[in-house]
Each structure stands twice: as structure tokens, then as C-alpha cells.
Image: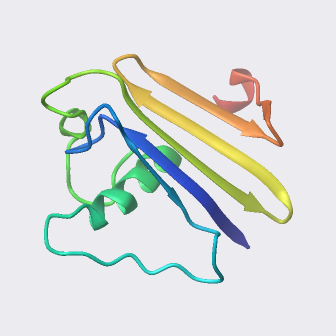
Amino acid sequence: MITFKEISYKNFLSTGNNGNTIFLNDRPSVLITGQNGSGKSTVLDAICYAIFNRPYRNVSKTQLINSVNDKDCLVEVKFDVNNTSYRVVRGMKPGIFEIYKNETLITQDALQ
């Protein structure tokens, strides 16, 4: 079972350089609500981008980078699978892709 713990992102879609961090395991369940355009779908897009290298919605990867800053797009998601902690860091401009298992970086050779 996957337990998502935290999602952080900056310069991702309409999110600026200050970024957002959402803690997903503070409570037994989390409900994300808000008005249209408040960023609910951005959370799902950020999780999917970090893990699968593509957003949930039909948005091109070049459109994921905040159009005002046009750099430093960074997404980090933390989750547990069967009592093993993972942290995935992915970004564009510059390109970053790192996976940590129990806070130890998995070698890039294993990812290819």
C-alpha cells in the first residue's frame, strides 16, 4: 500500500518561486477543496509529474514550467510503500531526477 506523506512544488504551473508544501499524512484522510482555479488539480499534476514524468491532465511538459519565472521548476513527493520511505525529486530548467529509498540516493544506473 502506498501512503503519500508530502508534496512540495515551486515554479510548477501557476505556482511561483515561493512554492507550496502540502502534508498528506497529518490526518487519517485528506480532502482538498477550493474554488475553481485555486490549485486543486495542480496538486494531482505535481504528484503524477514527480512519479511518472507527466502531469495527470493533458498539459505539455513545457507548459508545466511557470511562465513568469521560466526556470527552476521543482517537484518533490514523499511516500511510503510497505514501510519503506521514498522521496522522488523531479525538475526542469535545470533537469533533475532523483529517487531516494530510506534517504539513500538510488544510483542512476538502476533507473535506466
Residue at image coords 13%, 31%: 67
> In the displayed structure, does residue 54 sit left or right of residue 51?
left
Dividing the picture into quarters, in which one does residue 37 lie? bottom left
Which of the image's four quarters has the N terminus?
bottom right
Residue 5: x %, y % from top left: 64, 60
Which of the image's four quarters has the C terminus?
top right
Q: Is residue 7 above or below residue 88?
A: below
Residue 51: x %, y % from top left: 52, 49
Q: Is residue 88 above or below residue 36?
A: above
Residue at image coords 79%, 36%: 103
Residue 3: x %, y % from top left: 68, 68
Residue 77: x %, y % from top left: 56, 49
Residue at image coords 20%, 23%: 70
Compare residues 81 and 30 and report the one nearer the observer.
30
Residue at image coords 20%, 64%: 38
> In the displayed structure, does residue 105 sit left or right of residue 33?
right
Which residue ends up furthest to the top in the rendered image? 94
> In the displayed structure, does residue 59 sit left or right of residue 107?
left
